[in-house]
Image (cartoon, rainbow, N blue to C red):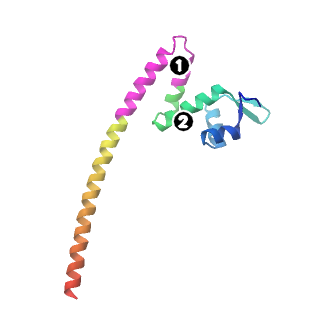
Amino acid sequence: MTADTLNIRQMCEAFDVTPRTLRFYEAKELLFPIRQGQKRLFTKRDRARLKLILRGKRFGFSLEEIRQLLDLYHMEDGQVTQLSQSYELARQHLADMQAQKAELEEAIGELQAQMAWGAKKLSELAKTKSSAA
């Protein structure tokens, strides 16, 4: 193991993931660690790819979308294709997230209104019950 590579434990600590997660991404051919028997050594390239995978997942990208974007890195066009497709995909995901946010804000407002109604009703019932006693 050199300074240029990390073992699976070090990768897990560095990125706050489980060994199972790393093996899963390796099985999905998103990461390509060096294999030395049972040992996996992750290169700087693997670390950069994992960082992008985790960011993509946080933004709601599917693993297939992430794979396609990562595969575009090796096109010899100065990353123009990769960047333009990443931008378009991000634009679509942002629009979806904003729509979900609006729906969630509406649901929160409705729930708050129902809770206010319920609190008022409970208060009225408590007053009725205490004056009847």
For disc 1, the marked residue is 72
Q: Residue at x 42, y 27 (%)?
A: 89
Q: Residue at x 22, y 76 (%)?
A: 125
Q: Name the image quarter holding residue 84.
A: top left
Q: Residue at x 78, y 36 (%)?
A: 38
Q: Is residue 3 left or right of residue 30?
A: right
Question: What is the quadrant of the N terminus in the image?
Answer: top right
x, y (%) of residue 121? Answer: 22, 70
Above or below: residue 42 compared with residue 16: above
Q: Report the amino acid beneath label 2.
A: Leu
Q: Residues within 10 Å of mark 1 (few under 14, many from 20)?
A: some
Above or below: residue 103 compared with residue 41: below
Q: Which residues are magenta?
A: 68-95
Q: Residue furthest front?
A: 3
SS category of the residue bearing label 1: helix
For disc 2, the marked residue is 54
Residue 124 visible somewhere in the drawing: yes
Between the residue at mark 2 and the residue at mark 1, the CA separation in whole angstroms equals 18 Å
Main SS, magenta region, reads helix
Q: Is residue 62 left or right of residue 10?
A: left
Magenta span includes 88:
yes
Q: Is residue 29 left or right of residue 97?
A: right
Q: Residues within 10 Å of mark 2 (few under 14, many from 20)?
A: some
